[in-house]
Image (cartoon, rainbow, N blue to C red):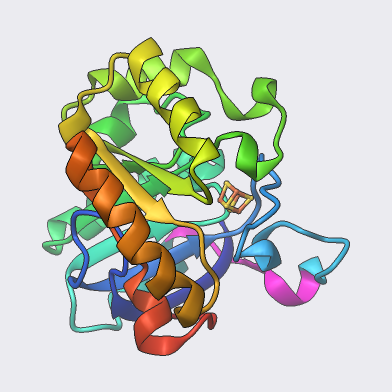
Amino acid sequence: MKVSEIFYSIQGEGTNIGVPSVFLRLAVCNLQCSWCDSRYTWDWERYDYNKEVKEMNVSKVCERIQEYDCRHLVITGGEPMLQQSELASLLPPLQQCGFDFEIETNGTIVPTEPLVNSIGQWNVSPKTSNSENSVDCRERSEAYAYFRKLPNAYFKYVVSSDEDLNEIMNLIAKYQIPRSRVILMPEASSEHELLEKNAWLSAICKINGFRFTTRLQIILYGNKRGT
Ligand code: SF4
């Protein structure tokens, strides 16, 4: 597997915010978001692939994950769904050891059945125009429609400004996503920016019946790797 990092921390975003978790961050992504804070997983013009990516077999990854006294695994990236066949081999033995799983994906790749059967929660984070990816790359209708049907999939949108809201409203109407499964999260890389946007965006969530999430890892640790 192409692994960026494995570490223990607190889930900082989404419905499981605050839950102590082991993180498996997989390398490589199929998008190039302008505000991506994990470019070291995919941007080989700025980062050195040989330094950033550890190529590990599934059993080694399985062993590393079990080193922590925690049985909740968050699979993130990069785009972890690019390695879904490897994940389909990794998860069952971990499940037998008592693990449950949530996975963070940009929602552009349809999952295969073995993975769907293993994952407890899908944190789907579809990108909008503020990411500066082309529409063709970022909005894959077959994947959107698939995740819409999974009852354990939440849709987490990164919001930079008021202009993003119309686009998000159009997307959730187009794919008929229930508001109770929509989460808005501020785009922010510093604590100061995050705290300012928390107040603005949480008020919007109250008006529209969306969930709100902050980015707890920035408040607790700053914008650092391995957190
Ligand atoms: S999808 Fe995620 S990892 Fe990929 S570029 Fe966008 S923010 Fe970064």
Depth check: 115 or 203 in front? 203
Q: Is residue 211 left or right of residue 216?
A: left
Q: Position of residue 174 (x, y in %)?
A: 39, 11
Residue located 17% across and 71% down the image: 19
Task: Give the quadrant of residue 215.
Answer: bottom left
Q: Quadrant of the C terminus?
A: bottom left
Does residue 215 sit above or below 124 in this rendering? below
Does residue 33 sit above or below 10 in this rendering? above
Residue located 38% across and 56% down the image: 75
Depth check: 63 or 20 in front? 20
Q: Quadrant of the N terminus?
A: bottom right
Does residue 213 sit above or below 10 in this rendering? above
Depth check: 184 or 83 in front? 184
Q: Is residue 218 left or right of residue 155?
A: right
* Outermost left residue: 98
Determine if the magenta segment contains residue 174: no
* Outermost right residue: 45
Residue located 20% across and 40% down the image: 207
Give the magenta range.
50-58
Q: Position of residue 163 (x, y in %)?
A: 54, 37
Q: Position of residue 158 (x, y in %)?
A: 46, 48
Q: Can residue 91 be seen by looking at this rendering?
A: no
**Number of marks drawn:** 0
* Outermost bottom residue: 221
Q: Can residue 149 be seen by looking at this rendering?
A: yes
Depth check: 115 or 14 in front? 14
Q: Is residue 9 left or right of residue 3?
A: left
Residue located 31% across and 69% down the image: 12
Q: Position of residue 87 (x, y in %)?
A: 41, 47
Task: Give the quadrant of residue 36.
Answer: bottom right
Determine if the magenta segment contains residue 51: yes
